[in-house]
């Protein structure tokens, strides 16, 4: 993002705010209010170049009616395949709201209560604290305040759901139960396993049969592997800051092993049905999928979200409070309660947002990593359809905000690089650093000497090439170039042998050879 495109709305957009005299003259006519879909469509088209987003789709539902469902740009910047409203992309963490409804269905059927203890239903669920394990309820799985810190590296490394459950037992808790807040995905995966235990069906099958099919979401898939090869789906993209911020395609990082937290793939056409379903209190085919009181429970604030854990956009929207429901972030905007959630996976984004009181709902898919045009379009839609306000240019404002944050991050990175001590040598010759290093949570890290360079391999074949930095610290570059560089620091024991390895703060102990 190396240039700033300032979006200027045509002056006639402001006309509805003026009061015109009832007196008519021969030379003047009553102005016609602009049509909101056309206004929004033009705004989207003008905003896209600012964010360099190859493609996206946008849905707006107002009072139960689809007032805009449109796609822009391309699925893939290389082959220029047009992005359409049928193009599949990841819902990512907006999946969480779907999992919450799946559990709510079971609550309504009397098969589980929000207050039930998870370990009573799923004995294999254990945390490092027996007390906390015995206290965590079904509702706690949805609120990010169980005491478990962010351990998302577990699913990134490709462990199965069963393996993740087993490895979670070794993760030290970060805070007391319900005493703080840390956003993470593993507890939603646990919720999916609870659904499997209760119903005998995997979360993937349950959400498809009990949610997608009744709503008529025929082009929505619970995991990436279920998508037909012939289906139109988007490609992830990333800005390469080492190559003049050029937008490049990247590989898709599957998250099917934590599907209940973010595994759904869908399209704008189906998400319009999803928004209508939510706006109509889960009515489908003339009947409710959930009881009114159960549906309402999903949107009640359940946990306070500290300001430093919320989105940077709040620096400009300035909410008075921020909270989390069951699969929804919440805050106030211009005196109204907003329910929303973002979804982010390498190179792909989404956002779902609603002001239930005003019966306005928005969904956006995008195919560029953390393109915050998604936030801009959500708030712009709220402004147009709720407040009849044409003035705010959230795209321009958020772009400036995030550019400043990125520039500041780059500055700090350069400051850190400047602290490098030059002209040092490793304590040992490179072969003595090789071997197997083990972390009881994350598994093995294999260090080898290949072509006179240290190479580190993690599970799921994530490979880093290590270059000496200073002393016994190395800088590692991943085969996934968009992950940037990681710091690897070796420690020696009292005999001068390599004994451990720290990767960005995660410590691996070297396995002694026999």
Image: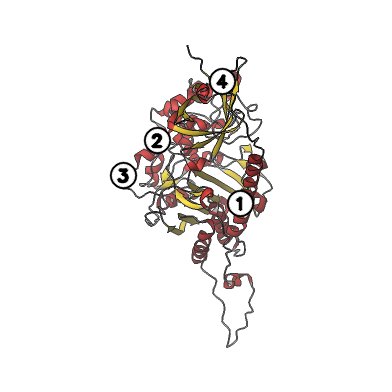
Q: Which is more foreground, mark 1 or mark 2?
A: 1
Mark nearer the N terminus (2 vs 3): 2
Colouring of the image: secondary structure
The Cα atoms of the two marked residues, 1 and 2, are separated by 35 Å
Residue shown at the point (52%, 38%) measured from the top left: 294
* Front one among 256 and 121: 256
Q: Position of residue 235 (x, y in %)?
A: 41, 48
- Say left or right for 159 vs 421: left
- Say left or right for 24 vs 190: right
The residue tagged with tag 3: helix, strand or loop? loop
Q: Which residue is mark 1?
A: 402
Q: Which residue is mark 4?
A: 498
The Cα atoms of the two marked residues, 2 and 3, are separated by 19 Å
Mark nearer the N terminus (1 vs 3): 3
Residue shown at the point (63%, 42%) measured from the top left: 413
Q: Which is more foreground, mark 3 or mark 4?
A: 4
- Tag 4–tag 1 contact (CB < 8 Å): no
The Cα atoms of the two marked residues, 2 and 4, are separated by 44 Å
Q: Residue furthest left?
A: 230
State which quarter of the image contains the N terminus. Answer: bottom right
Q: Which residue is mark 2?
A: 204
Q: Position of residue 376 (x, y in %)?
A: 57, 55
The residue tagged with tag 4: helix, strand or loop? strand
Q: Which is more foreground, mark 4 or mark 1?
A: 4
- Say left or right for 277 vs 127: left
Q: Is 440 above or below relative to 424? A: above
Query: Does the image show residue 51?
Result: yes
The residue tagged with tag 1: helix, strand or loop? helix
The Cα atoms of the two marked residues, 3 and 4, are separated by 47 Å
Res. 229 mark: 3
């Amino acid at each position: 993002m190396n240039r700033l495109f300032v979006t200027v709305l045509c002056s006639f957009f402001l006309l509805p705010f003026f009061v015109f005299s009832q007196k008519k003259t021969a030379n003047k006519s009553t102005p016609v209010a602009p049509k909101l879909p056309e206004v929004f469509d033009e705004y989207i088209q003008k905003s896209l170049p600012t964010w360099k987003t190859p493609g996206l789709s946008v849905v707006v539902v107002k009072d139960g009616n689809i007032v805009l469902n449109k796609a822009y740009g391309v699925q893939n910047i290389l082959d220029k395949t047009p992005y359409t409203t049928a193009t599949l992309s990841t819902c990512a963490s907006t999946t969480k709201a779907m999992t919450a409804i799946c559990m709510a269905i079971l609550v309504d059927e009397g098969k589980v209560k929000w207050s039930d203890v998870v370990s009573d239903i799923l004995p294999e669920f254990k945390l490092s604290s027996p007390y906390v394990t015995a206290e965590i309820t079904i509702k706690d799985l949805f609120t990010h305040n169980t005491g478990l810190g962010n351990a998302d590296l577990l699913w990134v490394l490709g462990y199965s759901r069963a393996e993740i459950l087993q490895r979670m037992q070794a993760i030290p808790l970060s805070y007391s139960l319900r005493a703080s807040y840390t956003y993470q995905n593993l507890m939603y995966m646990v919720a999916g396993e609870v659904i499997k235990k209760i119903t005998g069906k995997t979360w993937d099958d349950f959400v498809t049969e009990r949610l997608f099919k009744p709503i008529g979401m025929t082009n929505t898939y619970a995991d990436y592997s279920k998508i037909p090869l012939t289906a139109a789906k988007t490609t992830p993209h990333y800005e390469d800051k080492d190559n003049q911020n050029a937008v490049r395609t990247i590989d898709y990082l599957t998250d099917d092993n934590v599907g209940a937290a973010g595994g759904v793939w869908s399209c704008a056409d189906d998400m319009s049905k999803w928004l209508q379903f939510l706006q109509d209190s889960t009515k489908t085919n003339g009947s409710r999928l959930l009881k009114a009181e159960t549906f309402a429970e999903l949107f009640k604030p359940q946990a306070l979200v500290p300001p430093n854990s919320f989105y940077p956009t709040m620096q400009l929207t300035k909410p008075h409070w921020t909270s989390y429901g069951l699969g929804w972030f919440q805050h106030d905007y211009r005196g109204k309660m907003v329910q929303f959630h973002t979804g982010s996976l390498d190179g792909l984004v989404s956002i779902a947002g609603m002001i239930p009181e005003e019966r306005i709902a928005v969904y956006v898919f995008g195919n560029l990593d953390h393109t915050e045009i998604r936030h801009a379009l959500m708030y712009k839609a709220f402004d147009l359809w709720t407040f009849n306000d044409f003035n705010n240019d959230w795209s321009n404002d958020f772009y400036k905000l995030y550019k400043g944050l990125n520039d500041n991050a780059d500055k700090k990175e350069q400051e850190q690089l400047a602290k490098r001590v030059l002209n040092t040598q490793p304590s040992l010759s490179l072969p003595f650093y090789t071997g197997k290093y083990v972390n009881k949570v994350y598994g093995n890290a294999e260090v080898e000497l290949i072509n006179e360079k240290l190479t580190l391999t993690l599970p799921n074949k994530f490979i880093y090439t290590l270059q000496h930095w200073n002393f016994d610290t190395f800088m590692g570059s991943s085969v996934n170039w968009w992950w940037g560089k990681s710091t690897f620091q070796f420690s020696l024991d009292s005999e001068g042998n390599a004994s451990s390895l720290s990767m960005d703060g995660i410590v691996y102990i070297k396995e002694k050879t026999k």
